[in-house]
Image: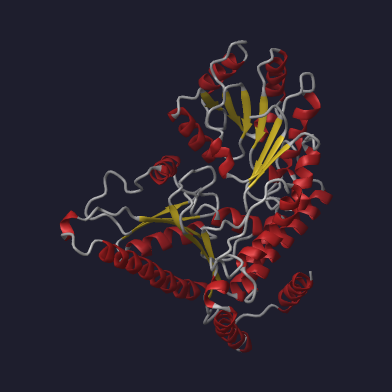
Amino acid sequence: MVNSDSSSISTPFAYGISNPTTQGLNRKSNEVSQVDQVAALEAYGIPVATINGTTPLSERKFIIEDILSGHPKIRLLYVTPEFCCTETFRRNLKRIHAQGELSRVAIDEAHCISEWGHDFRPAYKELSWFRETFKDPLVPITALTATATPKVRNDIVRLLGLDTDSMKWFHTPSARPNIHYEVKYVEELDDDIMSADEERFHDLLSWLDSVRKRRESRMNSNEAGDPIDTRPKLPPISGIVYVPFRSLADELALQLNKSGRNIRAVAYHAGLPAGDRKRIQKIWASKDPTPPEQIGPCPSFSIVVATNAFGMGIDNPHVRFVIHWAPPRSFEGLVQESGRAGRDGRAAVSIIFYNRNERDRVLERVKNDGQTGRTSNRFAPQSAGSKKHSMEARIESFNKVIAFCESTDRCRHEIIREFSGDLELETMMSSQTTRPNPTSTSPCDFACDVCKYGSAEIKRKKTEMLKATAQLETMGAYHNSDLHTFMYYWMTYFVRH
């Protein structure tokens, strides 16, 4: 790594820093990702440690004594931003810096520093302390994020005090070319949410059946002359289904297991015991997602039904599909969670189940998140102005999700690139040019539903959904005039801009 500031708009880049030769501090926001990445680095023989809320006091004392020794064995330390706010830890960092042992600070999920980010956390702003304090010698800072709009990128650079003249940029496209993006328009037949979930469940099973049949057809054609018992055992197809509630994760995983489709599904959310969560993480991150106690034939699918925390920092490159049961609460979440599929570079799928009633319900949850001040903490409480900016950012981000889902005539990849500000980054990094595929006849080489099936077919599917919703509202089963007026204003804004 060059001895200068750097910024990476790409989460997988973090996994590429696998051979540090100098002392560094890595600030991680999520304890799940800390544990997973520490285990991965230890497997490479790299001396690494982490301090978080679950670290025993005896182990914490041992780590601090080692990094203060002047000749530490630990080369990489993972901590949370809240821990970086404590006076004791800052005092220890000053001592490490004075000894010449602090060579770099890496800040993951750097978008959290911006009030215009989808996941603003006030403690991140306190990380500006690193640049203000460690000037002689200057300690380089690396900022890492999977998704950041131009406004958020500017905040990252400004608030962390990064040197724009010498800093290095690393960037991969927000819309990955190997991911097929698709929106499935689903009808909502009445105001019973569970009925809507039942419709989506049948759609999901139908899609999984089609995936399994295509795989079996390819295997049969490739190995037509081989005896069945000599054909290689296929590993299950791995996928993630993101749902908005813990109870829905539990119920959906149960129903998938009972569906008779040879599916192994597990629920993952913060309500599970810590031991169960660690076991699921370990199985999921392994090359074989089938647990040792698995009895009987290998499942066709290995699925985690989870709330949106799952996947952060868990490097499983073999995920073939990511499905959102409802529209994600933020555009950045859509890109980041979809990007957990196909990290091995092979073909993968991202699907969003969408209808306008569900859209309105998600909007209410987005507004409630902002009003309850979920981002505030005791280290850096939010001001009234910060809460207002945070709420505006949440609404703006969610309405990008709506515009993405409502569009029927634009390539989904193009929409993601536009909303993510990729074109601006590509201009800034003009020295790193890419050559277009001369044989492609669509912007994404048919890697989205609009380009693959055509605008007319997508409009037809959307119209069917709208008819069902209109009938529902006419019957008075679901109506909120203020909410619909609000949504009309935002949709008009995004169509015009």
**Snapshot quadrant of residue 256:** bottom left
Give the farthest residue toward the top.
70
> Residue at image x 23%, y 51%?
295
> Residue at image x 69%, y 45%?
112
Which of the pair 40/204 is nearer the observer?
A: 40
Q: Is residue 116 visible?
A: no
Q: Is residue 387 visible?
A: yes
The quadrant the C terminus occupies is bottom right
**Snapshot quadrant of residue 202:** bottom left
The spot of residue 259 in percent (x, y) is 33, 67
> Residue at image x 62%, y 49%?
172
| Left or right position of 120 against 54 | right
**Snapshot quadrant of residue 462:** bottom right
The spot of residue 103 in percent (x, y) is 67, 22
Which of the pair 21/74 is nearer the observer?
A: 21
| Left or right position of 303 against 335 | left
The spot of residue 347 in percent (x, y) is 46, 58
The spot of residue 26 in percent (x, y) is 62, 31
